[in-house]
Amino acid sequence: MGKLPSDIQSLMIKRSDFPAGFTWGVATSSFQIEGAGQQDGRGPSIWDTFCEEPDRIADQSNGLVACDHYNRLEADLDLIASLGVTAYRFSVAWSRVQPLGHGPWNEAGFAFYERLLVGLQKRGIEAYLTLYHWDLPQALQEQGGWNNREICQHFCDYACEVVRRFGDRVQTVCTHNEPWVVSILGHETGIFAPGIKDRKVAYQVGHHLLLSHGMALKAIRDMGFRKPLGIVLNQSPIYPASDAPEDVAKARLDDGIVVRWYMDPLFKGAYPADVLAWLGDDAPSVQAGDMALIAQPLDFMGVNYYTRNFSCASETWDAAKPGNPLTEMGWEIYPPGLTELLCRLHKDYTLPAIYITENGGAFKDPVVDGRVDDRDRVAYLHDHIQATLHAIEKGVDVRGYFVWSLMDNFEWASGYEKRFGIVHVDYTTLRRTPKQSALWYQSLLKG
Ligand code: FCB
């Protein structure tokens, strides 16, 4: 892959400082990299539909080709292996294996994931499989999507079929990626698919996501599957913008909406009372037995961490205010927030094993003479891996870390304009070029 400049080399972390058996990985998701949108019987997903609507995606792009990972699987697996990672986190596109989201299975779709899993196994890389990373079959959306309670059973059937076929080949199974995003960005602000703007719907959707998670965990365990099962949440510590009581109260509520709304039901079997009171009539309808199902024991929890947040009662917070650098997403770079978040969760909940299932940054990444000298990303990853180590030293049981992302990809509403990869993708030729950060990660992993 080439040589690292000495100032990047100096940002080294010793792998041996981490507990034995610590998992080191890279992460992706189906819609963001696979492409092959109309190949081999894949059904459309809500993101295909969303991309067709004008002005939903910054560069008016879509996921039909993306990184064409579907057709470049073997080369991409070699690329993953060349990094020296022990694990690869990816998601299954529900509409590729079950085009309508219920009813017939698509064997060609399953064959792709079979090839992926066999390829990982051959290369000695563990598979961290996510069942739902936002690409809902469009046919289910037409029946109300996540707002229709019946979807929970469809999700459960899909989950069981994937585990029945692939359970032997995976290391862990995760139900949902970031239910907050699906609920709030997909159904309250509407900036993500399916683009609905209705707070009541958003919270009902959130409830059905959690319920489907619990139902799937129970059903998978009832099949006799004994490997680690979990869920991935996006989280960030939320600080008040000032000591003013209104800001402190707003920060507490925002923490309830982002962190406790998911953590409390999963670990304590109840939604937080303050958020329920704030929602009033928009609170979700919950049936008897739902909360017990949601609170199934978890073998692990994934934390996706990118930045911290501030809450201000009177105005929108400017992320540049604290004076720290921002990523291309406009997100403040604040590594200590990861340590703080993990320690706080450890204090407030009885946590299972924790994995940092996503962490990374979007940067400008110009290609100069065939190289991408992304030292800002190296610094970002270095500082967050250190922050993870600090949490471990403070007693949090963190078992692994995954860089978001293996390669540049379709960054949802930002299209292809925001690059998170440690490998550069030229979207004209689809050529992959490892950035300096990939070389840096490789030398961390290979010692
Ligand atoms: C997370 C998503 C992931 C990626 C990163 C930047 O919220 O899980 O797909 O888009 O953000």
Image: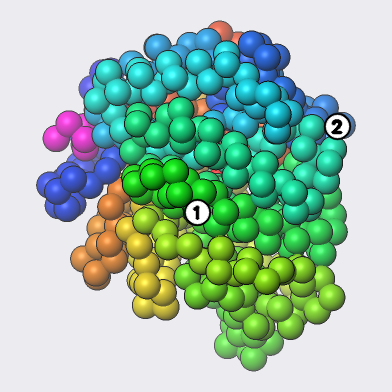
Residue sitting at 51 percent across and 66 percent down? 295
Location of the N terminus (image quadrant) = top left
Q: Main secondary structure of the magenta part?
A: helix
Amino acid at circle 2: Glu
Would residue 213 appear left or right of 313 to someone viewing this image?
left
In x, y percent, where is residue 10?
20, 42
Looking at the rendered structure, which numbered label has been put on residue 53?
2
Is any part of residue 159 visible from this angle?
Answer: yes
435 or 6, which lies in front?
Answer: 435
Image height of 209 relative to 362, above or below:
below
Give residue 319's position: percent from left, percent from top: 60, 61
Q: What element carries label 1?
A: helix
Ligand 1 occupies quarter: top right
- Magenta residues (range): 441-447
Foreground mark, 1 or 2, reads 1
On the rendered image, what quadrant is the C terminus found in? top left
Which residue is at 26% across, 34% downward? 86
| Label 1 Cα neighbours within 10 Å, binned few <14 / some 14-19 / many ≥20 | some
Residue closer to the observer: 51 or 168: 168
Which of marks 2 and 1 precedes in the sequence?
Answer: 2
Q: Position of residue 385 (x, y in %)?
A: 31, 51
Position in image of residue 398 (x %, y %):
30, 57
Q: Which of 430 and 232 is in front in this view?
A: 232
Colour mode? Answer: rainbow
Residue 308 vertical position relative to residue 369 in the rendered view, above or below:
below
Snapshot quadrant of residue 56: top right
Residue 334 vs 264, above or below: the answer is: above
Q: Residue at x 66, y 35 (%)?
A: 135
Residue of label 1: 218
Instruction: Name the quadrant containing residue 127.
Output: top left
Give the distance between the C-alpha atoms of the residues marked 1 and 2, in whole angstroms: 38 Å
Q: Can residue 325 be seen in this view?
A: no
